[in-house]
Amino acid sequence: MQKEMAEFVRERIKIEDEYSKNLSKLSQSPLAAQEEGTLGEAWAQLKRSCHDEAEVHLKFSNKLQCEVEKPLLTFRDNFKKELKKYDHHIIDLRKQLASRYAGVEKARKALADRQKDLEVKTQQLDIKHMNKHEEDIKKARRKSTQAGDDLMHNVDLYNRAQSKWFEEMVTTSLELERLEVERVEMIRQNLRQYTTLRHETDMFNQSLFPGTLVYRSSALCFLSIYLVMFVNKQI
């Protein structure tokens, strides 16, 4: 979710930047600049409010970038690195386990071949070539015994690798759970920060014209009254 949230905040920043730019441009509009008196002052005040509001939204945009988007992107990058590290670790353990299992199978086949060779040589034993066959049988028996020892050794290595696999899987699961808790908390904190900044922006907008809740609405109302009075005088 941190990726989607960062994209959302980035889009909000673009909107705030564009809104601020348009408000600033509007505040510099030459429209009705020739108006004087109380109506001219009301008009100038309305334009100043546009400029002030533009500044507020620009600050909001900058704070969103520094206090929400940037921490989210930093956390996302670190989170991906952590996941990648554990993923590689699990892959390495899986390869080790597969390698040990292959070693067991190879040793088992070698033992079967040696035992078969010993059996064949034992069956070929005859009195005429007793000494030669006995020597061959001894060699075959030694090789068979060695093959058996190799098999036991490889089985032991496999059992150790399997035990390590289970231990590391438990540890990795706990670490992944910890990362998930941190991820959820990070998103929660950034949502709170986003809400706080948005509330501060609203409060700034409301304080642009003391004694009112929303300055823009009050200024428009104030200007409308003067326009009505001005039109009535002309009539």
Image (cartoon, rainbow, N blue to C red):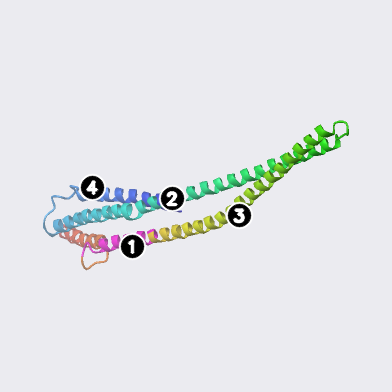
Q: Disc 4 or 3, which lies upstream in sequence? A: 4
Residue 25: mark: 4
The front one of 134 and 166 is: 134
* Residue sitting at x 25%, y 61%: 204
Residue 163: mark: 3
Please provide the residue range marked out in magenta: 190-209
| Residue 91 rendering spot, x and y as whole percentages | 55, 46
- The correct choice, above or below, for 169 with respect to 143 in the image is below
Q: Indicate the amino acid at tag 2.
A: Lys
Q: Give how far apart the Cα atoms at labels 4 and 2 are.
A: 33 Å
Q: Residues within 10 Å of mark 4 (few under 14, many from 20)?
A: few
Residue assigned mark 2: 3
The front one of 52 and 183 is: 183
Does the magenta segment cover residue 194?
yes
In the rendered image, the residue lying farthest to the bottom is 211
Which is in the foreground here, disc 3 or disc 2? 3
Q: Quadrant of residue 135?
A: top right
Q: Disc 3 or 2, which lies upstream in sequence? A: 2
Secondary structure beneath dot 1 equals: helix
Q: Give how far apart the Cα atoms at labels 1 and 4 are.
A: 28 Å
Which is in the foreground here, disc 2 or disc 1? 2
